Image (tube, rainbow, N blue to C red):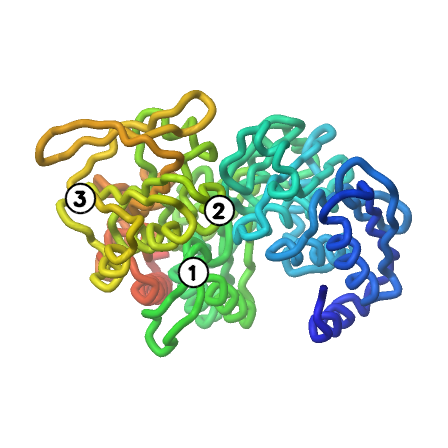
Amino acid sequence: MLDSSLKEQLKSIFADLKANYVMAVKVSAQHESKASLLELLGDVAACSNNLAYTVDEGKGLEFSLWKNSEKTGIKFRGVPNGHEFTSLLMAILNSEGKGKNIPDEGICNRVKALKGTINLTTYVSLTCTNCPDVVQSLNLMAVLNKNITHEMVDGAINQAETDALKIQAVPSVYADGKLLHVGKSSFGELLEKLEAKYGSDDKKCTNAVKNYDVIVVGGGPAGSAAAIYSARKGLHVAIVAERLGGQVKDTVGIENLISVPYTTGESLATNLKTHIENYAIDLLEHRRVEKVEIDCKNKILHIAGGEKFAAPAVIIATGASWRKLNVPHESEYIGRGIAFCPHCDGPFYKGKHVAVVGGGNSGIEAAIDLSGICAKVTVLEFADELKADKVLQSKAKAQPNIEIYPSMQTTEVVGNGEKVTGIKVKNRKTGEERTIDLDGVFVQIGLVPNGAVFKDTVNTNRFGEIEVDAHCRTSQAGIYAAGDVTTVPFKQIMIAMGEGAKAALSAFEDRMRGVL
């Protein structure tokens, strides 16, 4: 199953394993995926003397990871091929205490502080690009906290189970049988949801304030540029972010980063991290700012989970998030017919009728992608004409199963209590209202700035964007802002990077002038 070059890579990756690991399989003799699983695990086990697998009779198909004859709490119910192959490798490395995804001590302590016994299950698709992040995050939590177990379930192999749960989007995470989360997520977001559900032993977490010269909030292009420029001035710098890369990580292809003809969001995020690691910058991922406190010239950031960080200069670069429709019944059907990622959730709608709300580049690109999977794709655009690039419009109009309706306002999501069955729309020109019967809705209507937590500290406009001057200064001395969260026009990666650099230089100039 694994080619020779990949096997050689695995031998190198597993060369320093100290503990002994067993992948304990339980599988029905008649299971159609048995041979594939055993071949995969056999190939992996052959790459190290510290790896092995055992096979016992079972009802379905699963395997658990054991370390030195003890359970790690990690289980796979499926064949971890495709994007989930990395999840298997990371499970082994994390159990060994290795892997670049292992968070800093503060976050590890928060995981260890979770109360009670927690049993987690994540339903995935092997074609989903967002699922591995969730699976690997929860596997790592199981490694860090012995009271947590986590199992990955391949929805395709366990179709009856996913049908019974009426799962229509992945990843879908269940905590002790109750739905906890649907869709892409970060380690920090998942940790917060577990803290909210199960509680936390605060005695295991420190509340001491850690001080810096500059704190950058956000780890996207703007935040990364701001941190690097600040560090180059010899300042003590920290990045406080939910995830490094920010919204960029959700971008499939990037062709307008000047001097780089083509890259991907994932590659760009990796390159940003590599550049950051060349400097003495504290990278504090998986953290969300809950409150900002002004103490004379010092700004104190209160983090979800209890941590506090302080600095005389704070640069806000929190970017933006997917905008929702905000119509009746949208929220209750997220994951049950309302989706935001065509790459991850499109396969659930094979041969079905879906709508894409939004006629910009992301909406038309989504429609084109979905047209190869779905029987019919209906594009609904609020404006009188599409906003997407002409080349994309031409390609969409050339697809026989894509229909496009401009001047169309979405007014309500329709469902039967279990899943989406339609969408109500209104023609803005004629006033005609109708219901379109369909199976799913993909929302692609742009972004909303992530600046709500700062609105009582700095001035924002009616869209929620932080108001900045030409030097990225906000209404509060010592607080700067850059990128998509601000009023700067044209939300582009190139512009965000430049604004981040500008904010850092402005903060340094104010420091030299004695303003901070």
Earlier in the chain: of badge 1 and badge 3, it is: 1
| Mark 1 neighbour class, 10 Å CA radius: few under 14, some 14 to 19, many 20 or more | few
Where is the N terminus found, in terms of image quarters?
bottom right
Q: Position of residue 375 (x, y in %)?
A: 38, 44
Outermost residue, right side = 69
Tell me the residue that label 2 is attached to.
347
**Which numbered circle lies on residue 406?**
3
504 vs 243, nearest the viewer: 243
Tell me the residue that label 1 is attached to.
252
CB-based contact (under 8 Å), mark 1 and mark 3? no
CB-based contact (under 8 Å), mark 1 and mark 2? no
- For the point 44% across and 38% down, which residue is it? 291
- Label 1 to label 3: alpha-carbon separation: 26 Å
Helix, strand or loop status at disc 3: loop
Helix, strand or loop status at disc 1: loop
Q: Nearer the viewer, mark 1 or mark 3?
A: 3
Helix, strand or loop status at disc 2: helix
Say which amino acid is labelled 1: Val
Q: Position of residue 31 (x, y in %)?
A: 75, 43
Say whether residue 78 is left or right of residue 123: right
474 vs 144, nearest the viewer: 144
111 vs 119, nearest the viewer: 119
